Image (cartoon, rainbow, N blue to C red):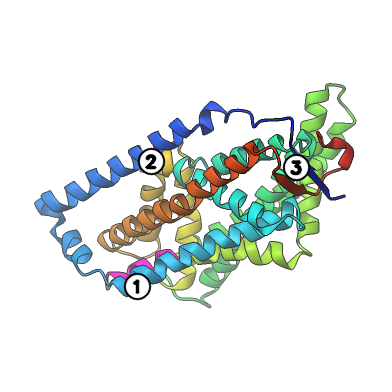
Amino acid sequence: MIARTARADRLPEPLPSQLSATRFRHAALFAVAIAALLGALVVLLPSLSALRTSFSGAEPDWIALAICAELLSCLSYVLVFRSVFCHRMDWRTATELGLAEQAANSLLSVGGAGGLALGAWILRQQSVPKEQIGRLTVTFFLITSLANVGFLSICGIALASGLASGPDDRLLLGGIPTAAGMVAIVLALAIGAFAGRLTTATDRASVKAGLAAIDEGVGGAIEQLRSPPALAGSTGYMLFDIAVLAICFRAFGLPTPPLDALALAYIIGQLGGLIPLPGGAGGLDLGLIGALVLYGSTAADATVAVLAYRAIYLIVPAGMGLPALASLRRRLAHPDAQFVFCVPTEARVR
């Protein structure tokens, strides 16, 4: 059921400390400091003359194209967010919510947990039940991960079978990602089924609610496989971001890795973002560079492309998402603001 309410008697609760404006500012300052340090090292260290030469040859047209690709990735995130959480949500709210989550993912990167936590907080301000938030968050996480896992398996098969070009050790570098992708899919389905069985075996309300969220969230993700907007959004969110990385090679006149090797390196390298540093600084960069080298790029080429990619990945989502978050918070504070969410009417606070 669609519920629309004007929140005349509630002001938004303060953001959790881990999502406060101060935390965002500190994360942004940390990212700027890291960028300044890296820039100084590239300029000053004699051993990095090759990097200086590559950066000096940047082509503005390719950089602009990379920025456009990152914009499309952010908008794809908005599309899958709206499809999962409420396909009748007005586009302004969906866009502001989605872009705000992207800013959190960019600046407070812990495998996307920052964006999910911010979205959950905003939904709670509109009295969306915690159980529904939990279930939809699991669905959203799985459906946005589906493209990564799917392409990990597809590109791995293409590389291992020789259908696509890549490094010499095709069987190992293609077979392991293929197996990992398939195991991840089976494991997700098994966890959902296992959680469903355990739900009836416990009397603890909090545990039961968590297990139910996992069970129903996995089921919701399977249902979303029949939703073209969800699939298009999930795929676009990943592919446009990979395109940014590919374009960054071209922008500096560097040889672009084959598509399958680039996709595998991108997906594997993203694991470095799980290190809890603002913007994934350091962990994500090293993860991407290491994976690109593993799949055939030189260390110098990979470093230039990844540093350019990371600059765009930080600037574009933050530049769009922080104003979107500010606008959304102003609307939440307005007594006559109206929002539409797919929740039971009786669950709303009037």
Query: Which residue does the image show at 39% across and 53% down from the upper left?
Result: 315
The reply, left or right, for residue 340 in relation to residue 148 is right
| Distance of label 3 from label 2 (alpha carbons) | 36 Å
Is 54 in the magenta? Answer: no
As measured in the structure, the alpha-carbon distance from the residue carrying label 1 to the one carrying label 2 is: 25 Å
Sequence-first tag of 3 and 2: 2
Label drawn at residue 28: 2
Q: Position of residue 71 (x, y in %)?
A: 49, 63
Q: Is residue 38 visible?
A: yes
Residue 229: % across, % down = 70, 65
Question: Residue 279 or 125: which is nearer the viewer?
Answer: 125
Q: Label 3 amino acid?
A: Ile
Q: Which residue is mark 1?
A: 62
Sooner in the amino-acid sequence: mark 1 or mark 2: 2
Q: Amino acid at mark 2?
A: Ala
Q: Earlier in the sequence, mark 3 or mark 1?
A: 1
- Counting labels gives 3
Depicted 273 relative to depicted 174: above or below: above
Q: Mark 3 highlights which residue?
A: 191
Q: Does the magenta run of residues contain 245?
A: yes
Query: Please, is residue 226 above or below residue 348 in the view?
Result: below
The three-letter amino acid code for the residue at tag 1 is Trp
The span picked out in magenta is 244-252
Query: What x and y, as percent, mark residue 281?
Result: 38, 43
Work out whether residue 167 can be spotted: no
